[in-house]
Image (spheres, helix red, strand yellow):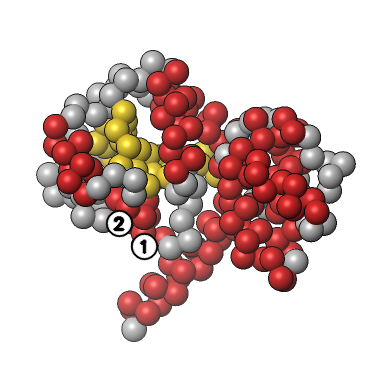
Amino acid sequence: MPAVESITKNVAWQNEEEKKFAKDIHQAVSYPKTKLKMMNYARQTCILPSMMTNKVSGLINDSLIYPEHFMTSATNYSSKIDAVIAGLVERRGNGNGKIIFCHYRAEIDEIKRRLLAAGFDKIVIFDSRLSLPKRMKLLNETVIEVLIIQIKTGSEGLNLQKNFSEIYFVSPNWNPAIQDQAIARCHRIGQTKDVQVFHYMMDSFDDENTLITMDKYIDLVQEDKRVIIGEVISQ
């Protein structure tokens, strides 16, 4: 089998308004009654803050974020999506098909929109909005430059080793086995190229890492799960 190279891309916050908004959401994770909801929201602020636009007023009313910290322009930015698109543009035309694994539909649509604006034209979306026959027809009949997959929909059962050798994880998944399965869509028997896997993670909110992002927290959870899996398998 060809080699797999894993590359972590730590993304700095490019806008102070975006960073301050995301930081408030992350700090609100500490409230026990809303912990799970706020963890999901914190994850969204690391990817595409505009997914939070319709939730802001409710969070302010519930005193979960500071109204004086929030500016409406905060949801106009996405440092991570900027970094993902820049990476794809830089590597365009190198002969390697590219798979992007995402979690949210809004995230998928935004990435496609930006890729089209950057000049990509052979883009296919594979997510839960398409019926299974339509998904397979797209994969079988279309010359694809970039394939954007919702990870829960397409991390298993696809053989993509013929045309793809680059994988982009916009965000980590809570279950490392799901990511391993996703990588195996193109790193499998029949692959002739080395496979490169890019993991994008937002930086902490301070230099001392006293308040880490949900990206980094999920990555730590992955490490713990891999240790447990290794211990169970070795017994």
Is residue 38 depicted above or below 22 in this figure?
below
Q: Inspect this view and state whether residue 211 appears.
A: no
Check residue 177 in the rendering and tell me which mark sits there, or answer none: 1
State the image coordinates of residue 67 (x, y, percent, origin top left). 84, 44
Pointer 2: residues within 10 angstroms few (<14), some, or many (20+)? Answer: some
| Quadrant hosting residue 196 | top left
Q: Which kind of residue does numbered mark 1 sit on?
A: Ala
Q: Secondary structure at mark 2?
A: helix
Classify residue 41 as left or right of residue 7: right
State the image coordinates of residue 55 (x, y, percent, origin top left). 67, 48
What residue lies at 53% left-to-right and 56% top-to-bottom? 219
Q: Secondary structure at mark 1?
A: helix
Q: Which kind of residue does numbered mark 2 sit on?
A: Gln
Give the CA separation, mark 1 to mark 2: 6 Å
What residue lies at 36% left-to-right and 62% top-to-bottom? 177
Q: How many marks?
A: 2
State the image coordinates of residue 96 (x, y, percent, origin top left). 27, 29
| Quadrant hosting residue 15 | top right
Classify residue 97 as left or right of residue 44: left
**Which residue is denoted by mark 2 in the rendering?**
181
Q: Inspect this view and state whether residue 93 appears.
A: yes
In the rendered structure, are the residues bearing label 1 and label 2 in contact, judged by CB atoms less than 8 Å apart? yes
State the image coordinates of residue 182 (x, y, percent, origin top left). 32, 51
Check residue 137 in the rendering and tell me which mark sits there, or answer none: none
What residue lies at 14% left-to-right and 32% top-to-bottom? 141
| Quadrant hosting residue 102 | top left
Q: Nearer the viewer, residue 138 or 120?
A: 138
